[in-house]
Image (cartoon, coloured by chain):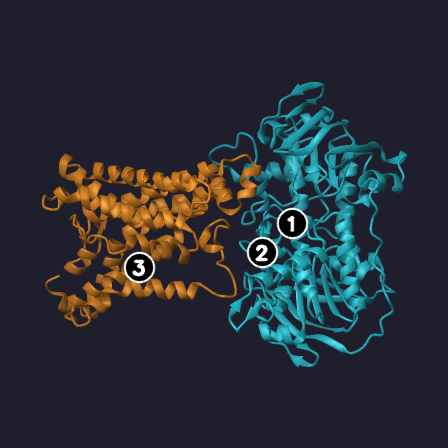
Chain colours: A cyan, B orange
Amino acid sequence: MTEKPAMATLPPPDVMVTDMTKRFGALVALDAVSVHFESGTFHALLGENGAGKSTLVKCLMGYYQADEGDISVNGVTQHVTNPRHAHHLGLGMVYQHFTLVPSMTVAENLVLGEEGLPSVINWKEHLEILEAFMQSMPFRLDLNRPVSSLAAGEKQKLEILKQLHLGSRFLILDEPTSVLTPDEADQILGLMQQLTDENRISVVMITHKLREVEAYANEVSVLRNGRLAGQGYVKDLTHADLIRMMIGSEKVSKPAVRTEASRREIAFEIRNLVVGNDKGLTAVSDASLQVKEGEIVGIAGVSGNGQTELVEALSGQRDEESGEIFVRGMKYGKTRSEMREFGINMLPEDPLNNSCVREMTVAENLAIRNFDQPPTTYAGCLINRGAVRRHGRDLIERFRIKTQGPDVRIETLSGGNVQRTVLARELAGDVEVLIVQNPCFGLDLNAVAEIRNRIMEARNGGATILLISEDLDEILELADRIIVMFEGHFVFETSREKADVHEIGRHMASHV
Amino acid sequence: MTDGGDLGWWGVLIAVMGGAIRVSTPYLFVSLGETLTEKGGRVNLGLEGILVMGAMSGYGTAVVTGEPWLGVIVAGCAGSALALLHGLICNLTRVNDIAVGISLFIFGTGLAFFLGKPFINPSAPRLPHLELGAWSTYPQVRSALEINALFIIGVVLAFALAWGLKNMKWGLILRTVGDSTEAATALGYSVNWVRTMGTVAGGFLSGVGGSFLSLYYPGTWNEGLSSGQGLMAVALVIFARWNPIYCFYVSLLFGGATALGPALQTVGITSNYYLYGAAPYFLTLGLLIYSSSTKHSLAGAPGEVSISR
């Protein structure tokens, strides 16, 4: 650490937030929240989506200006006006979505944010400084690799290294483990814990995963609906305490009930499927699998290992290079008439972009599968708008979609309700095969439970289900059989009964 | 070129190579300009208008002052001004850079024709060139090795830009903004400002490219001066993979294709003259088909450029 001697001597910043309130129009996103982030602690901000965690840290980082309340750093009240200002105070944030420049190397990304970067960069000198910096860190990366070739865990490490290199001593991590394997997550959080224990940095981790809070954090503050629902030392709180603070008095729906289905015939089969990605490289290589009626097959894996390309190939959004798909022994060519004949339904990831028409209304989106069939169509070509609206209203009610009515544009709905809308449409008709990808991404606990219940009900009713998810807990809860996907290959398969988290996690990270 | 007969087909080759150097200069400047603009994440399709405007303003300045180099600088400034317009309009939310570019193309050419009417007749002093072929007794070789000064500047510039994009602060910032808006915002850079500056710098180079047309080759000002070099440069940049040094090579290729028709004429092949004249357009089409694919996106494309998404 030749260039930043301060890091070794001064303690990390001590940050105090007092009575902070932030409103967006009529919505109170943050209501008089006070938190003390002590120097050198690992502090978790726990809460469900929309609880106000992100708003709180964005006010701290100067992205938003709080309407009321104070921020003080090392006892001095600060009015943080922009992220640059926050950097000067030693505050840095690692975002949930990577903010690295994909076409640049690790070294270029590290140099980019430096204060007072000279107009001509002496790469030889900079590489030496960066090499020395890497040596002082508990984890290292090759400086000359392009970021686009890094795995998700390595990108996360680079984001953290970048903040440390810029001199941030107070690191805010926004859902840092959402794209990592369990082992990668443990490794990174362990390193953060090590750095806080050595009193080199303070860490604030935004999360909704209780396990991470219990295993790594010293202190926790729980937010619910913009209010502080509780805080304290992790060692003083039980698991039940944390859950109660997080969801309050609301009842959590029970986990899905699995009935013992008599497994019947193979209904869906993929044979030797090869799919390329946008760069022309092979994303799915020689994948084969069979799914029976009344069975959920879960495909686990870290994001970016070919799942998206696999789903796009199954949905007809992407042509496969070779291989075949069969439904009930017949070749499936992904045409609309085949989808209808075989009863194939899909809930892809990012449903607003992948299976909705943004500009159309909720009712129209709900009718996309069947608008050209009676009763929504008469005389073969005229659409009965009344029937479309009735059909929409019926599904909105049955699936409890929160919308101002069937006639508002779908893009005005929240993420969870878009998800519900698509699920309603796909489950409404005659479901024989259902392909779902990350169905609960970004939803709150109750919505998650409800959607998982719907999927389980469809299974219990005899549907053939392929579930592709980055959330291993979801796979373990729902799937009858688990397949792990790594770098485009199906590398591991296990039954529900024999599933072992650590074994699955190992396969998610490499060929073993 | 009177006794082209002695050299036969060699004469054609020499004429194509000489033509490549001569004709490639505007392609080179415009494609370097477009590379800067696109590296910042925007496409400026108005470069054709900027090119024509540069040709007119450069020629006009040279006629009035008698100073061709002053004309080059004025052409660059006129190009920057038009590009600034593009940049500022695109800074508004929900404005499409392609649509703005097309209007700028029409606006720029129209404005140049309107303002350039008085300069159609007077003749301006030409830009200087180097006689690198003085050792040869063949007039064809001597003519082919008349290297114009702007070409040399352009070549140096191509290598300088390639170096600068890697080793200079502005290069890193420009690439960051062009590749990931999120990353640039998180680093505290103003995306709109950087993109506008990239567009303005690109406009300057395109304007200079235009001044070459009117001040060196063909060396006059009229309304049919440009034959779409500004538009073809956009295709050229895609084929050059946004790399300034490749821009240089691809400009030579396009220059050679343009010089094919006149070169064949020197050995007496005059049939199909217009067909050979269309060679650069065929080349553009062919290269675009070759470099595109339904299966994968363009390698090397800046992530934020609308044509690569």
Residue to which mark 2 is pinned: A353
How far, Cα to Cα, is label 2 from label 3?
40 Å
Q: Which residue is mark 1?
A: A403
Q: Are marks 3 and 1 on the same chain?
A: no
Nearer the observer, A392 or B120:
A392
**Label 1 chain ID:** A
Q: Does label 3 lie on the same chain as label 2? A: no
**The residue under label 1 is which amino acid type?**
Thr
* Above or below for A453 versus A446: below
Residue A310 in picture, x, y percent from top left = 64, 65
Give the residue pinned by disc 3: B254
The three-letter amino acid code for the residue at tag 2 is: Asn
Residue shown at the point (59%, 31%) measured from the top left: A83
Q: Nearer the viewer, mark 3 or mark 1?
A: 1
Gap between marks 3 and 1 measured at Cα: 57 Å
Which amino acid does the dot numbered 3 rest on? Phe
Quadrant of the frame with the N terminus of chain B: bottom left
Image-quadrant location for residue B234: bottom left
Q: Residues within 10 Å of mark 3 (few under 14, many from 20)?
A: many
Which subunit holds the residue at mark 3? B
| Residue drawn at x 69%, y 30% as measured from the top left | A169
Whether residue A376 is visible to the viewer of this picture, yes or no, is yes
Q: Indicate the position of residue B231 as horizontal and vertical percent values.
A: 32, 54
